[in-house]
Image: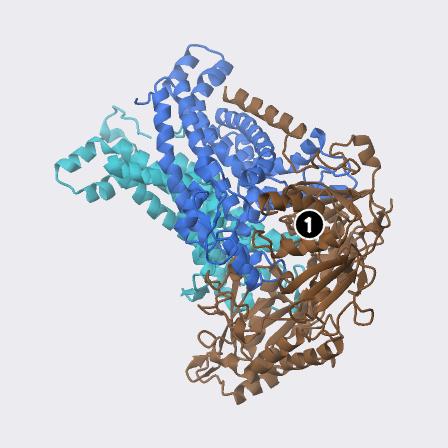
Amino acid sequence: METSLNPAPIAALPLDELETPPLSLGQLTWRRFRRHKMAMFGAVTLLFLFAYSFGGALVIPESYANFADTTLRLTSPSMAHPFGTDTIGRDTLARTIYGGQISIFIGLLAVLIENLIGIIVGALAGYYGGIVDSILMRITEAMLNIPEIFLLIVMAKFFGGKIPEIPLFGRIFSGSVVVIVVIIGLTSWMYLARIVRAEFLSFKESEFVLAARATGTSNFGIIFRHILPNSIAPIIVSATLGVANAILAEAYISFLGLGVQPPTATWGNMLDGANNYLESAPWLWFFPGLLILLIVLSINFLGDGLRDALDPHSRTM
Amino acid sequence: MGRYILKRLLQGIPLLLFISIILFLLMMNMGDPVATMGGRRVTRSSDYERLRRQLGLDKPIYVQYLYWLAGNDWAKTDLDGDGIAETSGIRRGILRGDFGASLLARKPVLDVIGERLPNTLILMVASEIIIILGALLVGIYSALRQYSFMDNFVTAILFIAYSMPIFFIALISMYIFAVLFKRWGLPYLPTVGMFDPQIGRTTAQVLWHMILPVLSISLISFAAYSRYIRSTMLEVMNQDYIRTARSKGLPRRDVVFIHALKNASLPIVTVVGLDLPLLLGGAVVTERIFAWPGMGRLFLDHVDRVDLPVVMGILMLIAVAVVVFQILTDIVYAWLDPRIRYEK
Amino acid sequence: MKRKLLFVLAIAALALSACGGTPKTEAPKTTPVNSTTPAVTEPPVSQAEKKVVTLIYTQEFDNLSPLYTSMWFAWTTWQMNNHWAWEFDEKNEPFPRLVTEIPSTANGGISADGRVITMKLRDDIKWSDNTPLTADDFIFTWEMAVSPKNTVATTYPYDAIESVTAADPQTVVVTFTEPFAPWLATLWHGILPAHILRPVYDAEGTIDNAEWLKNPTVGCGPYNFAEWESGSYARFVRNENYWGTPAKIDEIFIRFVPDDASQIAALKAGDADLGTFISYSDVPGLKEAGLNIMVEPNGYSEWMFFTLNKEQSNPAIFDVNVRKAIAMSIDRESINRDLLLGLTKVPASFWDALPYYNNPPLTNYPYDPNAAKALLDKAGWVDTNGDGVREKDGVDLVIEHATTIKEIRQDVQAVMQQQLAEVGIKLNVNPVDDTLYFSSYADKGPAAKGEYDIQEWSDGPLFPDPDLYYWKCDQIPTDENPTGENWFYICDKELDSLITLQSTQVDAVERQKTISKINQLFYDKVYLIGLWQDPDVYAIGSRLKNVKFSGVTMFFNIAEWDLVK
């Protein structure tokens, strides 16, 4: 939003009507983002959910979350157990806290893998073109040709049970968490690769690239210091939405029995475990379901807002 | 154009070969089909050896792949375990159209798939129609009334639907509309299957049983599609030619439906065209929950018991369909947008 | 443009479906004149007046032929359109079906040396196309089972038979190479029709591709197979040509519903009359909805088996006192009471369902964590470094436990983990997908390679026969013998000789003595720990009457089932 270049004498103008320095991309984005109410709601909710899962762990120890008292199985919410207890008497509230950590981890790590592979493949294919492009795109197409759910199932069985537990950040993660992260990452990079490739194709011949080449910047430098920062917008949007996708994919695979294995809790496998108790113990699905809904919803709002804010063609402003 | 199509088809072949190799390798490490042939017990060792030999599972991977690809009627197998290979095989291999026989049902794979294909098509095509029609309506309305109350409200609802795992929506809707409605004396929907056995398989029954599964599938894609249409429409509506049309005084309806929509249809066609062949996979989870006998369930059941020929058959069929549909989409694309031309 | 195309496609697809365009396996038109080939497309009016019972199967049978499948769900259909020579009632006692009486030493049916079984067939038994069922069919069934050209699911026990001959059309003489004790429970699970299949075998050299295997339209049971639409349903209609008392219900409709929650929803909504393999957690809800729950023992119980693999197992479990301590650290009673809702019991003996052989009856090791701790201390396993886990000679007491992915198993694993932690044992749980778990030694199947200290699954003797075979020394899998079945890697000479002995003892009294020795040995050496008994659990709708189940021939009285409005 440009300030009007009012031809009044400068001395007569109040200070803030003087020409302001141009806004950076970040500031511009933030301004547009702020107007998107749902995106703000999403961001706030996300912060809350992070605080719930990671802050909550400071209040409730993990041993409490795993403590099973079978005589208390399936009790409805009460003062002692605000979210009720599950099929072997563990406290649902505590499990949603620790389950949230795993779900969020899976979301973030899967997207990390997905982005690494997608960006590298897309950048190389778009930048070098020719044979490199052909081969990489054939591989991408091959993976895209197989429906994601099939790939997930096949890979889950392939890797299942072969990866041991990993202790990290004071928690022990069962091997199945790693498996899930890897297979979700391996099955979702293709979309990003195509987007990145399209960006690189269009930027390859632009002036600033030619200039960089003329000054002798290496290919590596051009890719990572010049083109990539300019194509960051779709990558950010894709990454954000990718986290939501990963969380839902985890729930999906849990339904098929191939996800993270109990006793490790995730919101996805808690929801799946409630399938047989829809009527008799609704608290078993209500709370994990609500949390999944909130996190995916807020991520989607956030992503939507980011897309609108970063997209120069949008009608806002 | 013809030469372009031919070139694309030819390019598809090494792609398909490559896919088949990856899939075959993955399948090989997924477990043992003979392990669960013992019913509730582990297969007895005497049966185990015999079955592996008879089903050709004792050969190394590359040999099994070769047989799958080119058949084994040119090779001799040792059926009776005496170490001498004297019986010729009867398989002709996938290159000659023989997808092999299911290890479990002992029926040809194409028969097994063919029985389920129409069921999936019915479900998926109906869902796709509802999704597209609904998404168009909502997407266009949203684009025209961007950020109005209705836009935000509808967007919110759709986002909520989009954010739920599908198995959950399916189970909850089954519980509400089938079990609880019946209990409360309201008109209710059926729970599982394609028809009521007392009445038989009539069109009315199938349609009636289709309602819940289609609802579950549509709800989720609906949200994504409508957002996509909305953003595409927005992009188009901001173009110069729209402004020109409006300033020329053309009625709103014409502007939207004739000029804007036609140009927005391009990316929509791409998305739909690429989605269609994936329909063949069926909504795996929905089919399982509603006991709908489709391809998705077929895949799940047979992957579970590691029935290699059937699983490979399904995956290859889908891969072929995707390649074909990609070519079709490109052709339709070119037809719709006269600016696009493909090299000869 | 695109929309119109899609619309047309949709209409076409719908039209196709309505015309029954789905190729399903139907009754072929080429059957003998006298047969009652049921019409597949019946007019809707008479459908509504028929008595139709709907059963839900959570797994679809892979095929319907005796010999070609071992699936429980297929076995259930053999009381519908086929028969066993003798079947078993709700007390799992044998009663004659195709024979006039059960062969025994008293009536001369079993020879003195126990090798020859002579069966006298009824003279009124016939196939649904009016061809008489004779000894020839039995001989043919045996020939097909042992022919190397047929890809049958199992050749057991037919490969132990030297010959099957017919003295006359109503007499079948079965000669075993050695005395074979389990013959009563394992022989003649369904008969193949020689008059239909022999021509196929002679022409093609195998019956693998015979039409009858996919469409067993000719049968000898109270129902005839009508159609099977893969993934969806199968239909059986009353056999009007049945040689026995005609069935009361007109049609049996089997629907395949793989998802547990969906099965329960369908039962509650009244969309089905019978449900199979009901989980205990669903029982209260179903009872509330008005269904009856019936439980039938079948010899199976859920066991934890110790794997004594010198190369991979934790050295702790080689000490019988450690195994005893583990048995006493798990509160099995509370698991049964709380997680299984008290609907089943803790099994004390492998032969719990065959009380004749569990004699004198065993009692379980009690839940006594203090005694367990004392045993562990005495065995030299103490927690010196205060991490909560005992160790000895630098080895931690960490037990690898594996089972397949199933809700109740995972719940119990979590509880056991907690209970064992209280006595200082760390239990690592390893849930594995079942086709991976039961893979062979050659395929690096983890159970076959003895990678876990404790393996858990549901098993039992060859019910209703007390036979067992897993623990034989020569059955331990090695590279030279990769198909060995002794996945417990236990070579106990005494156990080995007892197992071999009992399988040859045709005299029940002698056999009982041998098995009770094995029973006691299992208890003393704690080779296995029982968790819960695993009977068949059925849910029956209120309109279905006269239903009885057997643990062996499940639907043995299906001809008597009736529907009331």
Q: Which chain is cyan?
A: A
- Looking at the figure, which quarter contains the C terminus of chain B? top left
The spot of residue A97 in percent (x, y) is: 52, 59
Q: Residue C34 appears in which quarter of the rendering? A: top right
- What residue would you read off at disc 1? C57
Asked if residue B168 lies left or right of residue B200, the reply is left
The residue lying furthest to the left in this view is: A215
The location of residue C262, given as percent across then percent down, is 67, 48
Question: What's the chain of the residue with tag 1?
Answer: C
- In the displayed structure, C255 sits above or below A258; it is above
A71 shown above or below B30:
below
- Which residue reaches farthest front? C167
Task: Kindly identify the amino acid type of the residue bearing the numbered disc 1.
Answer: Tyr
Q: Position of residue B167 (x, y in %)?
A: 59, 46
Q: Residues within 10 Å of mark 1 (few under 14, many from 20)?
A: many
The local secondary structure at tag 1 comes to: strand
Name the residue: 60% across, 32% down.
B122
Q: Quadrant of the N terminus of chain B?
A: top left
The residue lying toward the viewer, choosing from C130 and A254, is C130
Task: Pick whichever, A206 or B43, lies toward us.
Answer: B43
Q: Which chain is blue?
A: B
Q: Is residue C27 above or below residue C118?
A: above
Residue at 23% x, 29% y is A10
Is A113 on the left-hand or right-hand side of C109? left
Q: Residue at 57% across / 86% down in the picture?
A: C375
